[in-house]
Amino acid sequence: MRALTTIEQLSTDEILQLVKRARQLKAGSPSQVPTGLTAANLFFEASTRTKMSFEMAERKVGLTVLPFEANFSSASKGESLYDTVKTLEAIGVNVLVIRHPENMYFEALIGKVKPVIINGGDGTGNHPTQSLLDLMTLLDEFEDLQGKTITIVGDLAHSRVARSNVQVLSRLGANLQFVSPLEWQAEFPVLYSLDEALPNSDVVMLLRVQHERHDEHQSFTKEHYHSLYGMTKQRMDAMQEHAIILHPAPFNRGVEIADDVVEGSKSRIFKQMENGVYMRMAILEHLLKEEAE
């Protein structure tokens, strides 16, 4: 496999093997990535967690990381993504992690360029590495997901995280339910009351309200959204004893989640971030272990 652009590329066995390998790496197993390879992270949208997590993972598996800042690259002069990638290919970069605002941007690259391509998020379409680290976090809590009810809450219409998670979680037997304002429903069959969804939820996965993708008709006040769909301390306390809370972050405090829930007893948000490094190490190893052969 020369790229990871969508979850659909991976078989269920491959997905579970990546979780297993990420756990081994977290426990101290040495990386099997060949030496002498170079990576660059091309992020054309703002990112802290994904970009820095990938850079940490790249360094941990022994890659040389070339810095890339979109605002100071030739992309700001009108250079196409394809030409940027071909330039990096020409100077010897072996793997590119790309986040881009255009859905399916990678279709213009796959099969046409030599570097391994990893999708760090395309528009509102896919975020495969986030769904894999979320899965790792869930399987740390539950032996398996068969029959578990996972409630995804929030801005579904603009969420690449939701779409990738739906693909992997449904494949592993989870029951999915969705809570969202009607205007952010998109293709998902939604419930409109978070309070009604909580009693049977084993996991509540909160989504960031993506204000930057909304038009003027899709705007809640922070207080209004929080009152209807936010994870408050009271709602956390109403969840089942074993239930947990996830959020891909960045989170808007006082909007999707209350301050005292972010690091509350049911929150696994920072564990998701920690697991993200090891899952991305496993993905890099999976894609690059034959690169030098």
Image (tube, grey):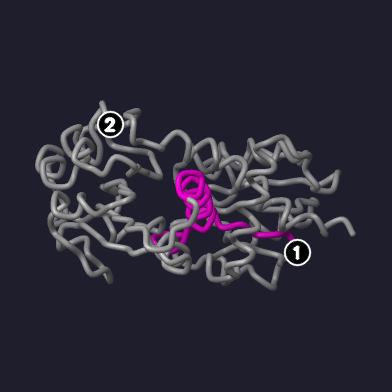
Q: Is residue 65 left or right of residue 136?
A: right
How far apart, in angstroms, are the residues tagged by discs 2 and 1? Answer: 45 Å
Residue 2 picture location, percent across and down? 71, 65
125 within the magenta span: yes
Image quarter (top left, top right, bottom left or bottom right) of the N terminus: bottom right
Compared to residue 288, the image places residue 185 above or below, namely: below
Q: Nearer the viewer, residue 184 or 289?
A: 289
Identity of the amino acid at label 1?
A: Lys
Q: Residues within 10 Å of mark 1 (few under 14, many from 20)?
A: some
Q: Are circles 2 and 1 on residues that touch, CB within 8 Å? A: no
Disc 2, SS: helix
The numbered mark at residue 157 is: none
Q: Residue at x 66, y 64 (%)?
A: 3
Disc 1, SS: loop
Q: Nearer the viewer, residue 65 or 249?
A: 249
Mark earlier in primary sequence (2, 1): 1
Residue 50 picture location, percent across and down? 52, 43
Identity of the amino acid at label 2?
A: Val
Q: Residues within 10 Å of mark 2 (few under 14, many from 20)?
A: many
Q: Residue at x 64, y 70 (%)?
A: 110
In the image, the segment drawn in magenta is 114-142
The residue pinned by badge 2 equals 261
The residue pinned by badge 1 equals 114
Q: Is residue 53 left or right of residue 191?
A: right
